[in-house]
Image (tube, rainbow, N blue to C red):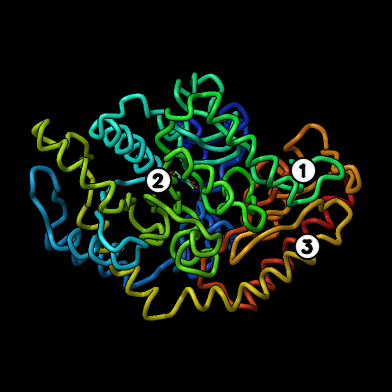
């Protein structure tokens, strides 16, 4: 069966984020079912889902309560839009719950289906806001090199990863990228971490001044950079850059798509990294990845001028067919109920001590340059020479070999260049953490015996 499916896959499926040329002659991994932190391919081989799908599955696979919540909502009211003042209970209840969980006393929740469409919403909201406030010059947008915010035209322009730009003619004009807060890679020889922070903060201010001190509307940042290579900012990074942003009246949009809902051991990444958001983007673990749903949460301060302007225009003419899809909202509500009932974020903060101990242990391998992480997420950066931090040539090959070896040994991870990203479902136990890292260590030993 798997050969037949593979043939059909190669013939008909246009894969996202895939080397299409290699895929044509490769063997797709065709997954069939999941149970807890494990997934099984069509041949029956078992894997630990070490990336939680795409950083999204918090509750593991086969959660019956989520299945039931979806089925019940499908039977009752399987589709409904929120356009033109129509509404339904799941969206109303979910927006109330999210406002309670948010850092804002008052505000609003705008639903979408993906992190990328939510970040396009962010861009449009802040553009609309500045037009409404009579500041039409204040439209430029800041992101960071290696930041990842999606691949739609606006969110792809916020993203600071060259492969997401090349041949797509991105970023579009008006988007700028400041430094990656990665001391290990970006710190200069003999520069302390504090000096590095001072330098990148000064670079940010210089960029703002160069492009016009009054021309930026917002900066978007992930609390930790995920898809750009699991980069943990140095202590004190966000308060420092936020003092610059505040000086120039630039809002900070907190992209919680990976960090939100417990990944770092707190509910939100902004708590772990001392961020003061004006607005937040959430997705992925909002429904534990079971249904596509995202949201933008804005404070009342942002919403009010937008509300008044929409009155003048006659409509707030932005929204998606699937904004607040009732089945997605019902599943998200159930997901949040389970997080609370099972005290999942406390579980993460407890087991992450063991997880991060195992991460730190990997630094003793000859070709592990940096083993970094927080909560239940980690990045293992492979280097040819630990002293000089020289990369293997060609960049990305050794990462792929290690990810392939892990897969052969029963662990799914993702190679981001030569950084191995690990981000298991949040329900993982200490003994399963050992199982994951034992496979990773065996795979590292196998790969470096040969290379
Ligand atoms: C931080 C962050 N923002 C936005 C996105 C885009 O989300 P989506 O792929 O649902 O459009 C991602 C996806 O990985 C992400 O990690």
Rendered view: 168 above or below 279: above
**Real-space Cα separation, disc 3 to disc 1, in angstroms:** 28 Å
Residue 243 in the image: state x and y as whole percent.
Answer: 53, 48
Rendered view: 103 above or below 153: below
Query: Element at badge 1?
Result: loop
Query: Element at badge 3?
Result: helix
> Of all residues shown, which one is farthest toward the front?
247
Disc 3: CA contacts within 10 A as few (<14), some (14-19) or many (>=20): some
**What residue would you read off at disc 3?**
441
Rendered view: 207 above or below 373: above
Disc 2: CA contacts within 10 A as few (<14), some (14-19) or many (>=20): many
Between circles 2 and 3, the one closer to the viewer is 2
The answer to whether the beta carbon of the residue marked 1 is less than 8 Å from any atom of ligand 1 is no
Location of residue 434 (image quadrant) = bottom right
Quadrant position of the C terminus in the picture: top right
The mark that comes first in sequence, 3 or 1, is 1
Q: Residue at x 21, y 36 (%)?
A: 318
**What residue would you read off at disc 1?**
187
Q: Is residue 121 visible?
A: yes
Rendered view: 430 above or below 413: below
Residue 235 in the image: state x and y as whole percent.
Answer: 65, 58
The mark that comes first in sequence, 1 or 2, is 2
Between circles 1 and 2, the one closer to the viewer is 1
Marks 2 and 3 in Cβ contact (< 8 Å)? no
The mark that comes first in sequence, 2 or 3, is 2
Residue 67 in the image: state x and y as whole percent.
Answer: 30, 67
Q: Is residue 24 visible?
A: no
**What residue would you read off at disc 2?**
115
């Amino acid at each position: 069966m798997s050969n037949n499916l593979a043939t059909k896959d190669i013939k008909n499926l246009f894969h996202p984020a895939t080397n299409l040329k290699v895929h044509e002659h490769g063997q797709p991994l065709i997954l069939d079912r999941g149970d807890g932190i494990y997934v099984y391919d069509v041949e029956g081989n078992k894997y630990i889902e070490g990336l939680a799908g795409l950083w999204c599955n918090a509750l593991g696979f086969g959660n019956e309560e989520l299945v039931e919540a979806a089925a019940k909502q499908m039977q009752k009211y399987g589709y409904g839009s929120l356009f033109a003042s129509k509404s339904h209970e799941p969206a109303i209840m979910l927006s109330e719950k999210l406002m309670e969980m948010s850092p804002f006393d008052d505000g609003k929740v705008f639903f979408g289906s993906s992190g990328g469409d939510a970040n396009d919403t962010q861009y449009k909201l802040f553009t609309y806001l500045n037009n409404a406030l009579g500041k039409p010059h204040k439209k430029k947008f800041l992101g960071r090199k290696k930041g990842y915010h999606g691949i739609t035209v606006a969110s792809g322009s916020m993203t600071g990863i060259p492969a997401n730009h090349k041949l797509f003619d991105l970023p579009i004009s008006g988007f700028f990228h400041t430094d990656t807060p990665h001391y290990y890679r970006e710190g200069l020889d003999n520069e302390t971490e504090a000096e590095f922070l001072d330098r990148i903060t000064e670079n940010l201010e210089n960029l703002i001044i160069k492009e016009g001190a009054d021309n930026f509307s917002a900066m978007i940042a992930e609390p930790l950079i995920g898809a750009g290579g699991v980069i943990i900012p140095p202590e004190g990074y966000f308060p420092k850059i936020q003092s610059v942003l505040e000086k120039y009246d630039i809002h900070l949009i907190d992209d919680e798509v990976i960090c939100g809902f417990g990944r770092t051991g707190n509910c939100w990444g902004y708590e772990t990294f001392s961020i003061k958001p004006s607005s937040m983007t959430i997705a992925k673990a909002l429904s534990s990845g079971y249904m596509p749903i995202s949201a933008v949460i804005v404070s009342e301060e942002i919403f009010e001028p937008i509300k008044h302007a929409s009155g003048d225009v006659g409509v707030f003419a932005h929204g998606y067919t699937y904004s607040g899809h009732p089945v997605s909202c019902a599943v998200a509500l159930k997901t949040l109920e389970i997080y609370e009932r099972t005290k999942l974020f406390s579980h993460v903060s407890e087991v992450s001590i063991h997880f991060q101990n195992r991460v730190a242990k990997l630094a003793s391998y000859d070709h592990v340059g940096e083993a970094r992480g927080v909560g239940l997420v980690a990045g293992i950066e492979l280097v040819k020479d630990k002293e000089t931090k020289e990369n293997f040539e060609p960049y990305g090959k050794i990462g792929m070999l290690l990810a392939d070896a892990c897969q052969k040994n029963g662990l799914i991870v993702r190679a981001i260049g030569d950084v191995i990203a690990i981000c298991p479902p949040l329900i993982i136990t200490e003994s399963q953490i050992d199982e994951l890292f034992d496979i990773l260590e065996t795979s590292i030993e196998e790969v470096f015996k040969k290379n």
